Amino acid sequence: MKILIANDGSTFGQAAVEFAAKLIDYSGDAEIKVITVVEPAVTLELETMIESVEDLTDPANPLAQKAAQIGEGSVKLLKEKCGDNCPHVTFEVLGGAAVPTIVEKADDWEADLIVIGSHGYRFWKRALLGSVSDRVAHHASCSVLIVR
């Protein structure tokens, strides 16, 4: 089974990693990939600044460095939980808008399951801010587990 875990570094992203660690069948041949998405900056006028994926994920970019720390921490936690029976666990820093980037990575990697955290916004906040986990669930071609 291939499990893709999206972690944005928030407490909700961390909850997704911890929940996934409980679900994984460590006796099988699971593959786990943790991804963190570096999104383009938005100006006060709500216009997206054009940044290439290469710029977003450049190791010199402080946001990419932070994303790598999140990924490394997630891998470390998963490996601590599974002990000697650890499946193949990797992480990747991706650049772009979160929803299409997560969905495309899941498709390209042929994931069986996406695990993602939810901020738990109620109706009005979700209407104003949007819900990454909700949109991933609606657009992914594989199963999606949303962790609160």
Image (tube, rainbow, N blue to C red):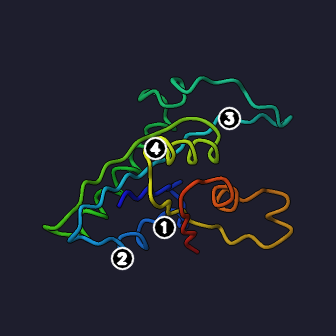
Find residue 94 and report its horizontal and vertical position in percent: 49, 38
Q: Earlier in the sequence, mark 3 or mark 4?
A: 3
Q: Earlier in the sequence, mark 2 or mark 3?
A: 2
Mark 2 element type: helix
Which residue carries the number 1 mark?
16
Q: Earlier in the sequence, mark 1 or mark 3?
A: 1
Q: Residues within 10 Å of mark 2 (few under 14, many from 20)?
A: few
Find residue 121 and report its horizontal and vertical position in percent: 74, 70
Q: Amino acid at mark 4?
A: Lys
Which residue is found at the position 29% from the left and 54% from the top? 89
Q: Along the line of sight, which residue is nearer the eye, 116 or 11? A: 116
Q: Residues within 10 Å of mark 1 (few under 14, many from 20)?
A: many
From mark 1 to mark 2, how far is it between C-alphas? 10 Å
When asked about the image quadrant of residue 137, the answer is bottom right
Can you tell which of label 1 and label 4 is closer to the viewer? 1
Can you tell which of label 1 and label 3 is closer to the viewer? 1
Mark 3 element type: loop
Residue 41's disc is 3
Asked whether the residues under the numbered discs 1 and 4 touch, taking CB atoms below 8 Å apart as contact, a structural biologist would say: no
Give the farthest residue toward the left. Answer: 84
Which residue is found at the position 62% from the left and 45% from the top? 98
Which residue carries the number 2 mark?
22
Q: Amino acid at mark 2?
A: Lys
Asked whether the residues under the numbered discs 2 and 3 touch, taking CB atoms below 8 Å apart as contact, a structural biologist would say: no
